[in-house]
Amino acid sequence: MSTVILARHGRTVANATGVLAGRTPGIRLDDVGVRQAGEAAQRLSGLPLAGAVTSPLERCKETATILLRGTGVRARVERGLTECDYGEWTGRPMKELVKEDLWKVVQAHPAGVRFPGGEAMAEMSARAVRSVRAWDARVSDAAGDDAVWLAVAHGDVIKSVLADALGVHLDAFQRIVVDPASLSVIRYTPQRSYVLAMNTTEGSLAHLAKQAELPEQKLGGGAGPTVPSP
């Protein structure tokens, strides 16, 4: 199977001001978010991408455009990667939401949460994981098992995909941090998935173009990726 780079969108005004944007239309990157996406794009320099998909929301599509500039690759919209539907919580300040009884459940038992008038976190996780795994299989069939592709999505969506790849329960996904414009990497294989990186904001990922020997093929952790000489 191939390797997916999970990119969270860059910072937005909603992020900066502590508002839960959710699926609110028209939320775009702020100046910091544009810069963050540009820096993430530099990290992908020299890495051929076999394809790309993005959440349909503006902040992700804008990030995808910046990440893919000059690559000749265009991101296809994947609705399975859209933000969680936070229902009545959408658009509310975080400082208000932390006072809600449900907030404690979101932090301790997210697998049991359904947002009022919205989506259950377990439903969000299931459709996000299903989408990423389906696209990964599609990319592998079209471009081979050494292919690398990009998926641009949201914090909770990426956290749920990483939790699945790590083999941990959704209730543990709040232990995973995914910052704006961070890049996380998963390699899927017929045996298991491997999380190669999480929440990274520095360093070239060009070495992913030449896949190193998988950890399952030796004991002791292996020698790591072959990093191109400067």
Image: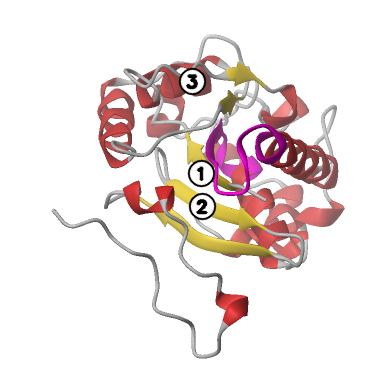
Circles 3 and 2: CB atoms closer than 8 Å: no
Three-letter code for the amino acid on which mark 3 is drawn: Arg
Image position, residue 99 (x, y; %): 64, 47
Circles 2 and 1: CB atoms closer than 8 Å: yes
The Cα atoms of the two marked residues, 3 and 1, are separated by 17 Å
Q: Can residue 178 be seen in this view?
A: no
Point out the tag, 2 or 1, that comes first from the N-terminus. Answer: 1
Snapshot quadrant of residue 138: top right
* Mark count: 3
| Position above or below: 116 against 106 | above
Image position, residue 191 (x, y; %): 76, 67
Three-letter code for the amino acid on which mark 2 is drawn: Val
Asked which secondary structure carries label 3, the reply is helix
Q: What segment is highlighted magenta in the picture? A: 139-157
Would residue 131 be found to the left or right of residue 226 on screen? right
Taking the view exactly as shown, the residue that stands out farthest to the bottom is 220
Residue 59, labelled with which disc?
Answer: 3
Asked which secondary structure carries label 2, the reply is strand
Residue situated in front as seen by the camera: 130 or 146: 146
Q: Residues within 10 Å of mark 1 (few under 14, many from 20)?
A: many
Q: Is residue 148 visible?
A: yes
Residue 5, labelled with which disc?
Answer: 1
For the point 50% across and 16% down, the residue is 74
Q: Is residue 138 magenta?
A: no
The Cα atoms of the two marked residues, 2 and 1, are separated by 5 Å
Image position, residue 170 (x, y; %): 76, 59
| Position above or below: 48 against 26 | below
Residue with the mark numbered 2: 185
Q: How crowded is mark 2: few (under 14 residues within 10 Å), some or many (20 or more)?
A: many
Snapshot quadrant of residue 104: bottom right
Taking the view exactly as shown, the residue that stands out farthest to the top is 26
Q: Does the magenta stretch include residue 154?
A: yes
